[in-house]
Amino acid sequence: MKNLIFSNNDKMPVLGLGTWKSKPGEVFDAILEAIKVGYRHIDCAHIYGNESEIGEALSLAFSSGIVDRKDLWITSKLWCNAHKKEAVIPALNKTLSNLKLDYLDLYLIHWPVAFSPDIYPTQAEEYISLDDIPLSETWEGMGEAQNQQLCRHIGVSNFSVLKLKNLISESSIKPEVNQIELHPYLQQNKMLDYCKKQNIFLTAYSPLGSSDAAKMLSKSNNPTLLEHPDIMTIANENNCSPAQVLIKWAIERGTSVIPKSVNPDRIKQNFDAAKVALSTENMDLINRLDLNFRFVDGTFWVMKGAPYTLENLWNE
Ligand code: A2P
C-alpha cells in the first residue's frame, strides 16, 4: 500500500478504514476483518461513540499477533466540547483509554466549532464563539499533547483554506493534515493546491458519498455518487466496482482516503481498490463531475442566535 510520508519519515497508508457511522456491535468485527485483509490505517473519533469497541478489537489484534501496534496508523479527533487549551490532553487521554492505546499516530481538531455540552448543543447559548476560544488556543493544547508524546502528529479537520492560513500565521507548528469531505462532487481543487504547496496532507472523508449519513443528517434527495453513470461506465470498463473507482480516484489525486464499511466483502473490495488502474481519460472524466456539493454541509452547527453560519464555517 502506498504511503504519505511525513517530514520525520512516519508513513500514513493512503487507504484507511473509516469508522464514522459504524455502530457498536458492528465495528469490532469490521476492525478485525480490515486488519486481516491488510488495512493498516484506522480513522476514529471520540464523537463516533464506538472507540471502546474499536479498542477491544485492537487489543485482540495485538494480543493474537495479527498485527503490531507500530505497524498500524491510528487517527482520532478532539470533540468540540474540549477546545479550551487545558481540555485537550484530558480529552485525548479519554480517547487513548477507550482505544486502549498509549499514543495516537494522528490527532485532529474535529471541527472549527466550539461549545459546552458533551455531544451537540440544543440551544444557541451553549455555543462558544471562536473569539472566546480561538482555534490558536486549541492548537496550543494540541501541540502540548504532541510534546507529551500522546500523539505523533497533529492536524485539523473541516478547516477552510482561510482557517489553515490563519492558524499557520498564528502558530509556530503547522498542521500536518486536514481531513475534509472530498469526492467527485466536492473536489476542492483550491484546497488541494494550497495544501500541496504547504506540505499539508489531505484525507478524504465521505469518499463514497456517505449514503448512510443522509437520514442522520436529515437530508433527502442527495445525488447518489455510487450510481453516477460515468462512475458506473468507468467501473465496467475497468472490471471493478463504482466504489473502487471513487477510492482509486482519491488516491491518484495524492490524498489519503477512508471509506467506511462494516461489511466484510465491501471492506475487502474497498482495500483492493488500490490495485485498480484508472486511465488519464478516466481521471479526466471524473474531474468534470464537480458540483461543489457537500453531503456533510455543516447546517447542524447553524442555530438562530449562535455564532456559527455556513459562511463563517466554510469561508465561502
Ligand atoms: P456498509 O458499511 O454497509 O458497507 P462513506 O465512506 O462515503 O461514508 O460511505 C459509507 C457508506 O457506503 C456506507 O453506507 C457503506 O455501507 C457503503 N459502502 C461501503 N463500501 C461500499 C462499496 N464497496 N459499495 C457500496 N457501498 C459501500
Image (tube, rainbow, N blue to C red):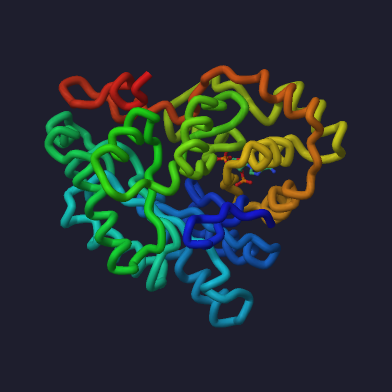
- Is residue 126 left or right of 10 when viewed as pictured? left
Image point (65%, 52%), residue name: 263
State whether residue 141 is above or below residue 232.
Answer: below
Give the quadrant of the N terminus. Answer: bottom right
Q: Name the residue nearer the viewer: 291 or 152.
A: 152
Q: Quadrant of ligand 1?
A: top right
State whether residue 257 is above or below residue 297.
Answer: below
Image point (53%, 72%), residue name: 70
- Is residue 210 left or right of 118 when viewed as pictured? right
Q: Is residue 304 visible?
A: yes
Res 310 quadrant in image: top left
- Is residue 294 left or right of 109 when viewed as pictured? right
Q: Name the residue nearer the viewer: 284 or 215.
A: 284
Give the quadrant of the C terminus. Answer: top left
Res 247 quadrant in image: top right
Where is residue 19 shown, x and y percent of the image?
51, 51
State whether residue 38 is above or below residue 202.
Answer: below
Where is residue 256 shown, x and y percent of the image?
58, 46
Where is residue 170 shown, x and y percent of the image?
24, 40
Q: How many marks?
A: 0
Where is residue 164 shown, x and y percent of the image?
35, 36
